[in-house]
C-alpha cells in the first residue's frame, strides 16, 4: 500500500490518475491518518504557513495531506479558539443558551454587537457568583473603579448571578475592563458583557410603585388638571434609582391608568409623547372620561383605526404627529376629515387650529351668568336656612354631637365621601395624609371607587342612631362660618334642599394638619315647629391654597340671641330611647334591662355610655347577669 501513489497535476486542467508506481517529480498525495476523525484537524492546520511560504497542506516532502474533502481554496479561514458553529460545548453551551450567543469569554466585540437581535445601545452585565455580595456593595465598587460613569438598571439576582443593564457602549466597555480586577471576600469576580435589546420587565413591587407615584406627582399640575408622562422611561428620577419602566408594556400602562383613576379622576389633559405606545395601550385610555387634550406624538400608532378604541372620549385637542399612521395620510384635508369623523369636537390637531367644521347645528356663544356667593330659590327661606345652619354647626363643633340626635329623622340616611389631594399633586406619604386616609378615605362611599354593592350598603348609615354614632367618631372640629357658601336650589311646603360648603379645621389634630374643605347637602322635611334632616351627603377634601390662606382670618359675627328650636335640644323621645337601647344592647352584649340602666345613668348619651361600659367591663365590674338575655 505504501507504493501506491496518486499524481496531482499542477495545471488547472483535468486531473490524470495513474495506477502504477511513478517516480516523476510531481506533487505526491499520501494517505496519512490524522487520528482525529478526519476533517476536524484541518481547522487547526489550514491557517498555518511553512517557512518557505508554502501552504500547510503540503508537508516537508511537498506532499498534500489527504485529510480534507474539499479544495484548500474553498476552506474557511481559521480563527484560533473559535467555538464551532457559534456554540461551545458543555457548561459554556448551557450558559450561551441562557445568556446569548457569541460571548464565550464574556467580552464585548463588534461581531457580537452586529449579531445582536436589535442592534440597540443596551448591554446586560452578568457577574457569576455575584450573590456573595449585596447590591449596594457591588454597584459602589464598580462605580468607584469604572472610568466611565454609568447608571445600573433593573438590578436583580438570578441564582448565583448578579445581573443589571447599562446603556451605552462606552459604559459597557469600561465595566468590561474591570473583569478580574475586583474581588469580594477574597474571590475575584468575573464580569461578562452581552448585547441586549432592552432591560427586561421588572415586578412592580411597592418600591417601584412608590417611585412611579413620586414621578407622577412631580409631573402633575393639579390646578390645570394636567399630567405630563412624555418620554417616561427617560425620567431623571427613575434613572437615578436604576429603574427602567417603559409605558409600552401593558402591565406598566395598566398600573398608570389605575393610579390616574384613583387619584386624578377629573384629569383633562394627558401627555403621552414618545413612549412607543401601540393600540394595545390606547384601549385603556377610554377609562379616563374627562380627558379633553391627548398628546400621542412619537409613538407606534400604525393607522387611524388604532384610535377607534378611544372614540368615546370628547377630545378637543389631539396630537398624533411622528407616528407611522402619518406616512399613510398624504392628503391633509382628507386626514383632518377622517380625524373629525372619530372626534367631532376636536378644534386643534397636531398643534394647528382647525377651521370650523361646516354644519347647521352651531349654537351661538352662551354668556354665563355672574357668579353669586349664595343662592336662594325663594326669598322666604333666606332667614330660615342660615339660622338652621348656625344652630347645626354650633352643636356639631361643641364636642358633644349627641345633641344633634333630634335634628335627624327616624329614617334618615347619611353618606360620606372623600378625596385626598395635596398641593402639587397626589397625596404624599406624610403623617397628616395618613391620618386623613384612616379617618375619611377608609369610610368614603365614593361610587367611582367603591364597586362592591355590599361595601356600598355598609357605608350607607341608616337611622339617626347610626348616623349620630358615626358623627361622634369623627374628629372634633371648628368650622369657619365666614367661608360658608349656601345654596337653596329647591323649596316647597314638604321639602327643602340646602347645600353648604366651606372650610374647617380639626381641633385636636397634630400641628401641621392642613385645613379641610367640606360640602354638605341636607334634605329637610317639616317636623313640629321646625325641620329635620331626612338625607345628608358629606364630602371632605383638602382645602385649596386660596381657601387655606383666607380661612379663619375674619372673625365670625356674634351669634344672634334667638332661641334654639326645641327640636335640636330636647331629650330623646320614647321611640328614640327604645332604638338607642336596642342598638346599645347589640353593641355591648348586655340585655335590655342593663342597657337601659347604662343609658339612663349617662343622660342618654350614647357615646358616653359606650365609654363607661368599656371602662367597667375591662375592670370586670359588670355582673354576669347583665349579659343573660331572656328568650
Image: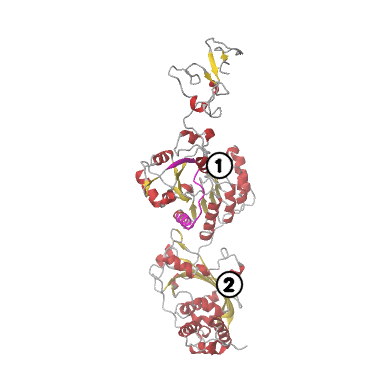
Residue, x 58% and y 80% (percent of image)? 409
Query: Picture coordinates of residue 214 (x, y %)?
Result: 45, 56
Above/below status of 471 relative to 231: below
In the image, 156 versus 216, the foreground residue is: 156
Residue wearing tag 1: 323
Residue wearing tag 2: 458
In the image, 134 versus 558, the foreground residue is: 134
Local crowd size for mark 2, using a 10 Å CA cut-off: few (<14), some (14–19), many (≥20): few
What secondary structure is found at the residue carrying circle 2? helix
Which contiguous range is marked in magenta?
Answer: 191-214
Disc nearest the viewer among 2 and 1: 2
Residue 486 seen in the current view = no
Mark sitting on residue 501 = none
User: How many labels sit on residues?
Assistant: 2
Query: Picture coordinates of residue 438 (x, y %)?
Result: 48, 69
Which residue sits furthest left?
144
Amino acid at each position: 500500500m505504501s507504493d501506491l501513489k496518486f499524481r496531482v497535476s499542477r495545471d488547472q486542467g483535468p486531473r490524470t490518475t495513474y495506477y502504477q508506481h511513478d517516480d516523476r517529480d510531481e506533487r505526491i498525495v499520501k494517505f496519512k491518518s490524522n487520528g482525529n476523525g478526519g476533517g476536524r484537524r484541518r481547522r487547526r492546520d489550514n491557517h498555518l504557513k511553512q517557512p518557505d511560504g508554502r501552504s500547510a497542506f503540503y508537508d516537508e516532502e511537498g506532499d498534500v495531506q489527504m485529510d480534507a474533502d474539499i479544495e484548500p481554496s474553498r476552506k474557511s479561514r481559521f480563527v484560533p479558539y473559535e467555538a464551532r458553529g457559534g456554540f461551545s460545548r458543555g457548561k459554556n453551551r448551557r450558559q450561551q443558551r441562557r445568556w446569548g450567543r457569541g460571548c464565550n469569554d464574556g467580552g464585548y466585540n463588534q461581531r457580537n454587537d452586529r449579531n445582536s437581535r436589535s442592534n440597540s445601545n443596551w448591554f446586560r452585565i452578568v457577574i457569576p457568583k455575584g450573590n456573595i455580595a449585596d447590591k449596594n456593595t457591588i454597584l459602589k465598587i464598580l462605580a468607584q473603579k469604572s472610568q466611565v460613569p454609568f447608571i445600573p438598571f433593573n438590578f436583580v439576582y438570578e441564582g448565583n448571578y448578579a445581573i443589571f443593564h447599562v446603556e451605552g457602549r462606552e459604559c459597557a466597555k469600561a465595566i468590561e475592563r474591570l473583569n478580574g480586577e475586583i474581588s469580594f471576600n477574597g474571590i475575584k469576580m468575573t464580569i461578562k458583557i452581552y448585547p441586549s435589546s432592552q432591560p427586561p420587565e421588572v415586578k412592580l413591587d411597592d418600591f417601584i410603585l412608590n417611585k412611579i407615584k413620586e414621578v407622577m406627582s412631580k409631573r402633575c399640575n393639579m390646578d390645570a388638571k394636567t399630567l405630563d408622562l412624555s418620554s417616561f422611561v427617560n425620567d431623571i428620577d427613575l434613572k437615578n434609582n436604576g429603574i427602567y419602566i417603559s409605558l409600552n408594556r401593558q402591565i406598566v400602562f395598566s398600573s398608570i391608568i389605575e393610579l390616574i383613576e384613583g387619584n386624578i379622576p377629573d384629569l383633562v389633559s394627558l401627555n403621552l409623547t414618545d413612549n412607543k405606545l401601540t393600540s394595545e395601550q390606547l384601549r385603556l385610555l377610554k377609562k379616563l372620561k374627562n380627558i379633553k387634550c391627548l398628546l400621542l406624538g412619537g409613538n407606534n400608532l400604525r393607522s387611524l383605526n388604532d384610535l377607534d378604541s378611544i372614540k368615546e372620549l370628547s377630545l378637543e385637542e389631539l396630537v398624533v404627529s411622528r407616528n407611522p399612521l402619518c406616512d399613510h395620510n398624504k392628503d391633509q384635508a382628507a386626514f383632518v376629515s377622517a380625524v373629525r369623523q372619530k372626534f367631532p369636537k376636536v378644534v386643534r390637531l397636531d398643534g394647528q387650529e382647525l377651521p370650523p367644521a361646516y354644519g347647521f347645528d352651531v349654537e351661538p356663544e352662551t354668556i354665563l351668568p355672574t357668579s353669586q356667593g349664595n343662592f336662594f330659590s325663594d326669598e322666604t327661606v333666606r332667614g330660615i336656612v342660615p339660622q338652621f345652619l348656625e344652630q347645626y354647626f354650633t352643636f356639631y363643633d361643641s364636642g358633644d354631637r349627641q345633641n344633634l340626635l333630634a335634628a335627624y329623622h327616624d329614617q334618615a340616611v347619611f353618606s360620606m365621601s372623600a378625596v385626598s389631594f395635596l398641593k402639587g399633586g397626589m397625596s404624599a406619604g406624610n403623617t397628616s395624609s395618613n391620618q386623613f386616609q384612616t379617618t375619611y378615605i377608609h369610610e368614603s362611599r365614593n361610587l367611582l371607587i367603591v364597586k362592591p354593592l355590599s361595601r356600598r350598603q355598609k357605608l350607607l348609615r341608616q337611622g339617626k342612631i347610626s348616623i349620630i354614632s358615626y358623627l361622634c367618631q369623627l374628629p372634633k372640629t371648628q368650622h369657619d362660618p365666614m367661608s360658608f357658601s349656601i345654596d337653596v336650589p329647591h323649596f316647597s311646603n314638604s321639602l327643602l334642599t340646602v347645600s353648604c360648603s366651606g372650610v374647617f379645621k380639626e381641633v385636636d389634630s397634630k400641628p401641621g394638619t392642613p385645613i379641610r374643605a367640606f360640602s354638605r347637602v341636607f334634605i329637610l322635611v317639616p317636623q313640629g315647629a321646625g325641620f329635620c334632616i331626612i338625607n345628608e351627603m358629606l364630602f371632605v377634601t383638602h382645602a385649596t391654597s386660596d381657601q387655606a390662606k383666607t380661612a379663619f382670618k375674619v372673625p365670625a359675627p356674634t351669634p344672634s340671641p334667638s332661641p334654639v328650636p326645641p327640636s335640636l335640644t330636647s331629650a330623646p323621645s320614647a321611640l328614640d330611647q327604645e332604638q338607642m337601647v336596642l342598638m346599645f344592647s347589640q353593641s355591648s352584649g348586655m340585655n335590655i334591662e342593663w342597657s337601659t340602666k347604662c343609658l339612663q345613668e349617662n343622660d342618654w348619651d350614647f357615646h358616653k355610655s359606650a365609654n363607661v361600659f368599656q371602662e367597667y367591663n375591662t375592670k370586670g365590674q359588670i355582673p354576669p347577669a347583665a349579659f343573660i338575655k331572656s328568650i
